[in-house]
Amino acid sequence: MDTVQWIVTVAGIGMIVAIAVYFLFKSEDVAMQARTIRGVQELSIIVKGGYSPSVVTVQRGTPVRLIFDRRETSSCSEEIVIPEYGIRRGLPPNEKTSIEFTPASAGTFEFACGMNMLHGSIIVE
């Protein structure tokens, strides 16, 4: 192999290792507790290539307001789906969208984009 082939091979191996490390050792989000404002649990979630935070903790029996702050135009993140609460809502690009519901039972409930590629969880205590 000549020098160019060596460089391409080493760069390719480096990219494979970087991708493997990213997916295998990606740190999990720490659950963020919603704060209560005038009797409503409220938390902002940034939507940009994923959800941040992707795990939120709320108390059952108290109304919840999740504010999705979509900071991108990717077609994947243009909708939020929370099946447990029958929620399916569009998220306009570069805007904030409030989703409100009252969790009646404890558990962990998933939310995702309309394509089911971006994921998050709501932990109800």
Image (tube, rainbow, N blue to C red):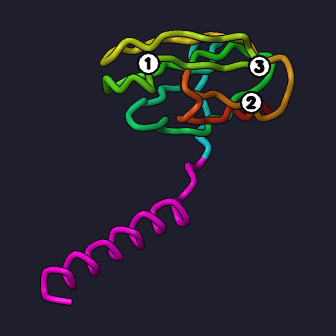
Q: Identify the disc placed on residue 84.
A: 3
- In which quadrant will I find the N terminus? bottom left
In the rendered structure, which segment of residues is drawn in magenta?
1-30
Question: Where 53 falls versus 114 (above or below)?
Answer: below
- Disc 1 residue type? Glu
Q: Amino acid at mark 2?
A: Phe
As helix, strand or loop, the secondary structure at mark 3 comes to: helix
* Residue at point 32%, 26% (across, down): 71
* Circles 3, 2 touching at the beta carbon (< 8 Å): yes
- Going 85% across and 29% down the picture, which residue do you hit? 106
Image quarter (top left, top right, bottom left or bottom right) of the C terminus: top right
Q: Nearer the viewer, residue 40 or 69?
A: 69
In the image, 69 versus 44, the foreground residue is: 69
Please tell me which residue is depicted at 38% across the width and 34% down the height of the picture: 48
Residue extending farthest left: 3
Q: Is residue 44 above or below residue 96?
A: below
Query: Do tag 1 and tag 3 residues touch (Cβ < 8 Å)?
Result: no
Q: Does label 1 or label 2 sit earlier along the sequence?
A: 1
Amino acid type, residue under disc 3 in the picture: Glu
Quadrant in the picture for residue 63: top right
Is residue 40 left or right of 6 when viewed as pictured? right
